[in-house]
Amino acid sequence: MKCRKCPARAVLRLPRHNTAFCPVCLTDFVRTQVQKAITSQHMFSTNDRILVAVSGGKDSLTLWEILLKLGYRADALYVDQGIGTYSQGSREKVEQFTEQIAVPCGATLTIHNVEEEEGASIPDLANMVRRPTCSTCGTIKRYQFNRAAIQGGYDVMATGHNLDDEAARLLGNVLHWQEEYLQKQSPTLPASMDGFAKKVKPLYRLTEREIAAYAVVNRIDYMVEECPMSKGAKMLVYKDVLNRLEAESPGTKHTFYWQFLAKQEKAQAAHGSMTDTDQRTLQPCTTCSQPTSTGICSYCKMVARAKTPAQ
Amino acid sequence: MMKSSMKIHLSHPTKEIEIKGPKHVRDLFTELHLIPEAYLVIRGQDLVTEDELLADTDIIEIRPVISGGSERTS
Ligand code: SF4
Ligand SMILES: [Zn+2]
Ligand SMILES: [Zn+2]
């Protein structure tokens, strides 16, 4: 199979765009999609300081690499969850990437160690507060990334969410009619109030397969192994269903999510934005002063419970 | 000793299998009941498309590209 843009041999077929690319043209395609996302969703400019949330997986490391290659000022934060060999392995990938690719571009990595800072690993914390590991993990990561962005004086925080993530999440939210979450599913979430960092998802126009292919051809060495806690996660089922639809009718995923974004934009223009809702419903946490709807935020509640000795 | 079939590395869970070549990538997907949208095929260090013919001497990785727990924040 030939590349559709040059005489070289193709390495990836992209059925949803009815095309195929060689490594050079694939790299160009992926970076162009990221730049389009940044510009069209008003994410940031070359003057802004960006904090990338990295996990050692394909999405976040690819995102960091692309932002640096496009000339953006992007540092990163890694949260070490203390999940056995998985955390160890992914941390090594992040450190290696930092040394080989990020440092030469003038970027820095910060590591937040949950065991040291919160006093126990994520699986142990989850046990103490009797909540599922993934929801405990989510609370801590969201909290720490937001805090690091605010305290470090970053203009915006970027995550590696891709088209498959967003389409799967949308499917889940629609299946359960979780309308309150639909509002937060946009690739750019403004810093709706003091204490909240602006959050962006520059990979939302790209599928997981396109991102993984970019990582392979650009020799980005990422953690292929998955977090052991993700086994059986609902998200994986939704992704699988969407990929089956995609095989039957290429373009299903992007049509589903992009049409939603277009409708959401119209609805917000008519009914007011997320910022209005946040400013109406949130106030500073009485313990740490990050915005919350419940007096004491869920992170502070969790840490307090973990520190209370069991009866 | 001559190699008589291609070596294939799979992940989630990690597994090594051997399959008799020559074989097209697309037929490999069918044989293993995998959906192409969820995987990449890597020969040595290089990505290959579905119409590529794989030989018995090839070292192949079929790499899943789908990830995610229920609370992906990164
Ligand atoms: S699978 Fe769950 S525990 Fe593992 S990183 Fe994702 S959210 Fe955290
Ligand atoms: Zn080309
Ligand atoms: Zn708090």
Image (spheres, coloured by chain):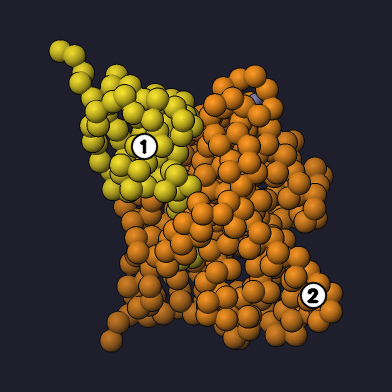
Chain colours: A orange, B yellow
**Marks 2 and 1: CB-CB under 8 Å?**
no
Q: Which of A288/A163 is in front?
A: A163
Q: Which residue is mark 1?
A: B27
Q: Which of B61/A259 is in front?
A: A259
* Residue drawn at point x = 58 percent, y = 80 percent: A178
Q: Quadrant of residue A268?
A: bottom right
User: Subunit of mark 1?
Assistant: B
Q: Which residue is mark 2?
A: A268
Horizontally, residue A140 falls left or right of residue A152, namely left
Q: Which of A48/A301 is in front?
A: A48
Q: Residues within 10 Å of mark 1 (few under 14, many from 20)?
A: few
Horizontally, residue A120 falls left or right of residue A177, namely left
Q: Which of B70/A197 is in front?
A: B70
Horizontally, residue A302 falls left or right of residue B74, namely left
Secondary structure beneath dot 2 equals: helix
Q: Quadrant of residue A17?
A: top right
Residue that sits furthest to the left in the current view: B1
User: Subunit of mark 2?
Assistant: A
Q: Is residue A146 visible?
A: yes
Looking at the picture, how far across and down is residue B28, in whole percent? 34, 37
Which image quadrant: the N terminus of chain A? top right
Secondary structure beneath dot 1 equals: helix
Horizontally, residue A13 falls left or right of residue B2, namely right
Looking at the picture, how far across and down is residue A177, in whole percent? 57, 81
* Residue drawn at point x = 38 percent, y = 73 percent: A132
- Determine whether A140 is above or below A246 in the image: below
Which image quadrant: the C terminus of chain A? bottom left
- Determine whether A35 is above or below A24 in the image: below
**What amino acid type is highlighted by mark number 2?**
Gln
Looking at the picture, how far across and down is residue A45, in whole percent? 81, 47
Looking at the picture, how far across and down is residue A39, in whole percent? 80, 49
* Residue drawn at point x = 40 percent, y = 25 percent: B53
